[in-house]
């Protein structure tokens, strides 16, 4: 029950943050991160219709599709996030703009929207609009990255905004906002506290393994291999550790076996004991 409540809180909070970033920072300067909020900004300036109402109206048909494809629980969390976004957008579009500087607005507006989208997705929902479309596409094409899908869809909407407002600057600064938004979103979803994987080719695997287990309190896996040039049997130790632990492990391994060969690579996600 606590987990379900937390997901609804994240969905609602995420929608509110997206509405805040859009209505308070981006909309007053005609900037957009694309999506239905981007379309709402266009309608707002062309027909003087509140952007919050436009986003809600646009999202209703998409919500009905989501119920069929994603299930009732996911869809109702999404609906809660949609309502939160529309309400926050309706309130904040009446506020005085946070800044009149286009570069600041594009960076901080994009960052705030990215945080909101990520929180909503963490709550297993979306704020509707193109992020829901992106989620529906990902259901069919799970190998695609959400940020990349959004970048393509939102880029098209921004191009239309630029043409409508007859300003290339709108497109350029909106492009910055979309870039920042997708990077922030991916950072939160995939995690900034990434781990490192070490592949250690050594003849002293026992001594190194003992150090990793006893001193660092990490585990390692021994992989049997053979050198292509020397034709000699080799042992490779695979160890996944926190990025702060890597320098200490690397220095100690060099002390134990100065002739070892080490490959260190970034792991964006590690699941299991200690991670």
Image (cartoon, rainbow, N blue to C red):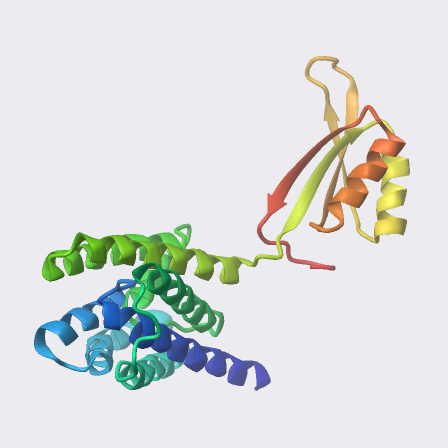
Q: Quadrant of the C terminus?
A: bottom right
Q: Residue furthest front?
A: 100
Examine the rendered structure and indicate whether residue 241 appears above or below residue 41: above
Horizontal and vertical percent position of residue 257 = 86, 29
Q: Quadrant of residue 204?
A: top right
In the picture provided, is 271 more to the left or to the right than 188? right
Above/below status of 60 relative to 148: below
Observer able to see residue 221: yes
Q: Residue at x 19, y 68 (%)?
A: 39
Q: Quadrant of the N terminus?
A: bottom right
Residue 67 visible from this viewpoint: no
Q: Who is closer to the viewer here, 149 or 187?
A: 187
Residue 109: x and y in percent read 36, 67
At x 56% / y 59%, what residue is drawn? 191
**In percent of the image, x 88 and y 33: which residue is there?**
255
232 left or right of 204 in image? left
Q: Position of residue 21 (x, y in %)?
A: 36, 72
Tell me if 33 is positioned left or right of 9 in this view: left
77 over 217 or under it: above or below: below
Whether residue 223 is situated above or below residue 169 in the rendered picture: above
Residue at image location 70% in from the left, 13% down from the top: 229
Residue closest to the eye, 4 or 257: 257
For the view shown, which residue lies furthest in the left direction?
Answer: 47
Q: Looking at the image, which is closer to me, 239 or 41?
A: 41
**Quadrant of the image occupied by residue 124:** bottom left
Q: How many marks?
A: 0
Quadrant position of residue 56: bottom left
- The percent coordinates of residue 80 (x first, y second) are 37, 83
- Locate residue 102 relative to residue 271 in the image: left or right: left
């Amino acid at each position: 029950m606590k987990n379900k409540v937390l997901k609804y809180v994240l969905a609602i909070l995420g929608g509110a943050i997206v509405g805040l970033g859009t209505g308070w920072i981006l909309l007053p300067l005609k900037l957009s991160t694309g999506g239905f909020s981007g379309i709402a900004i266009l309608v707002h300036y062309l027909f003087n219709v509140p952007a919050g109402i436009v986003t809600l109206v646009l999202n209703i048909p998409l919500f009905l599709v989501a119920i069929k494809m994603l299930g009732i629980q996911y869809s109702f969390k999404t609906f809660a996030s949609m309502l939160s976004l529309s309400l926050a957008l309706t309130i904040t579009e009446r506020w005085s703009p946070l800044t009149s500087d286009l570069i600041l607005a594009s960076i901080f507006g994009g960052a705030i929207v990215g945080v909101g989208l990520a929180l909503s997705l963490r709550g297993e929902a979306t704020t509707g609009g193109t992020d829901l479309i992106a989620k529906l596409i990902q259901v069919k094409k799970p190998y695609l990255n959400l940020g990349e899908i959004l970048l393509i869809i939102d880029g098209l909407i921004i191009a239309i905004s630029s043409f409508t407002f007859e300003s290339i600057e709108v497109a350029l600064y909106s492009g910055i906002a979309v870039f920042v938004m997708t990077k922030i979103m991916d950072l939160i979803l995939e995690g900034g506290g990434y781990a490192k994987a070490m592949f250690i080719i050594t003849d002293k695997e026992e001594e190194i393994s003992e150090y990793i287990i006893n001193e660092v309190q990490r585990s390692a896996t021994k992989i049997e291999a053979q050198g292509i040039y020397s034709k000699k049997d080799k042992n490779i130790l695979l160890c996944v550790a926190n990025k702060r632990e890597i320098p200490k492990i690397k220095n100690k391994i060099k002390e134990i076996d100065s002739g070892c060969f080490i490959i260190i690579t970034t792991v964006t996600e590690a699941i299991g004991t200690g991670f």
